[in-house]
Amino acid sequence: FESVRGFPGWRIVTGVMASRERTALLLDSSIDRLPFRLLESLERPIPAALTANPAPPCQQVVHQDDIDLRKLVPVPTATAQDAGPYLCLALLRAEDPETGQSDVTIHRMCVLGPDRLSVYFVPGRHIEQFLLKAEAAGRPFPISINVGLDPAIYLASCFEPPTTPLGFDELGIAGALRGAPVELAPCLTVNAKAIAHAELVIEGEILPGERAREDELTGAGFAMPEFPGYLGRAQASVPVVRVRCVTHRRNPIFQTLTGPALEHTALTGIPTEASILRLVEDSMPGRLLNVYCHPAGGGKYLAILQFRKRSLADEGRQRQAALAAFAAFGELKHVILVDEDVNIYDTNDVLWAMTTRYQGDVSTVFIPGVRCHPLDPSESPDFNPLIRAPGVSCKTIFDCTVPFPLKDRFVRAPFEKADIRKFFPEGLPQGPEI
């Protein structure tokens, strides 16, 4: 969007990574090699480094006095039911107040007022653990909020434990993807560092014990559209960021996304694919050929695993691979297992395998009572009385692989490839008649 009403000089962009093909192009890869590209960078991180530039791009324009985010930054509101304007690609960077270890994570943030932002942490996130340490010591918690970044940074930040344990700085993965350190710049008003080449940086502090209702502006009970496709429920009590300074480039670009969209699938799904590949390869090398986190699960809930059984001894290992996938990414809910002849990126092909190679009574594995992700609306005692608490789910494996002894009975019809050029000796027709 080139002309943003009320915000001269600003532009808004969304959908940068809404196509897997475009994401592959941005990372100099291909759609099927993307998780392997991230995996290589995970194994060889290049740590972030302070920029040598005394005037980093993110600080070309500085606002410190009379800050009003509502007038300074064009933060969109997605639906009439939203709690307010949301920063949906807000990359928080902060440091452990005790160890100095750093972390970056994307969190949803609602503009509550001129200099106040709410921030929702899914329980257990690393920056939340840093915050709790600061609060226990009675100290403000300084952070930088970075918007408008290299896709490599956004993708790297979406790795989760156990792949990136507490203390692992995901910016090292982004550095490896680009072959150079991510440059950091000291913030101007708080003891934190920002992404030097960001389009926008909001500097702030979370004051000890300060909390607010996420929907304090509306009282409607909703937050914003979340990746499962529903309006997220507003949290009753979330930390509040007090904004100290806003800096940005000249003619800045505000980057955002909508929750239930392909861009979210790429951001969270590709790092998840890499995490699953890593853990399964470590435990059973050469069997798992590829992984695809399907958009129907928003990149988090549904993974399709392409597994190769090399002998009778591999029968059953495909289900062990599924269990390893749940261990690699705890928020995963469903795993579909398919053979090597099934195209994991073609939903029709996957459903064909489920239709012709799957019997519900013997091909399904249920794992009830396991912690999953709190934004799945079906994970509540109201939906299933056997669920003890919101966020607990029944993880399920759908084994659509052919039993190894029956392989010869499930060979796909061997059609020959047709060369249509043989039917057009004078050249292929052009235009609408094709």
Image (cartoon, grey):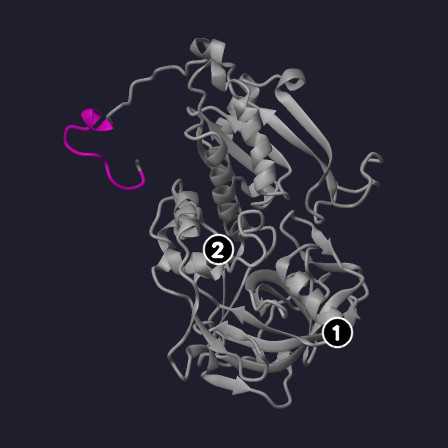
Q: Which amino acid does label 1 sit on?
A: Pro
The residue mark sitting in front, 1 or 2, is 1
Prevailing SS of the magenta stretch: loop
- In magenta segment, residue 50: no
Answer with left or right where residue 57 lies relative to residue 168: left
Residue 155 circle label:
2
Task: Measure the alpha-carbon separation of dots 1 and 2.
Answer: 30 Å
> To which residue does mark 1 refer?
208
Based on the displayed image, in which of its 4 quarters is residue 218 positioned?
bottom right
Rendering coords of residue 138 (x, y %): 75, 75
Kindly state the secondary structure of the residue where label 1 is placed.
strand
Region in magenta: 420-432
Quadrant containing the C terminus is: top left
Q: Is residue 246 above or below residue 24?
A: below
Q: In this view, does 410 lie above or below 293?
A: above
Answer with left or right where residue 417 lies relative to residue 168: left
124 or 353: nearer the viewer: 124
Name the residue located 33 percent from the left edge and 52 percent from the top edge. 28
Answer with left or right where residue 276 lies relative to residue 115: left
- In magenta segment, residue 428: yes
Residue 135 in sight here: yes
Residue 345 in sight here: no
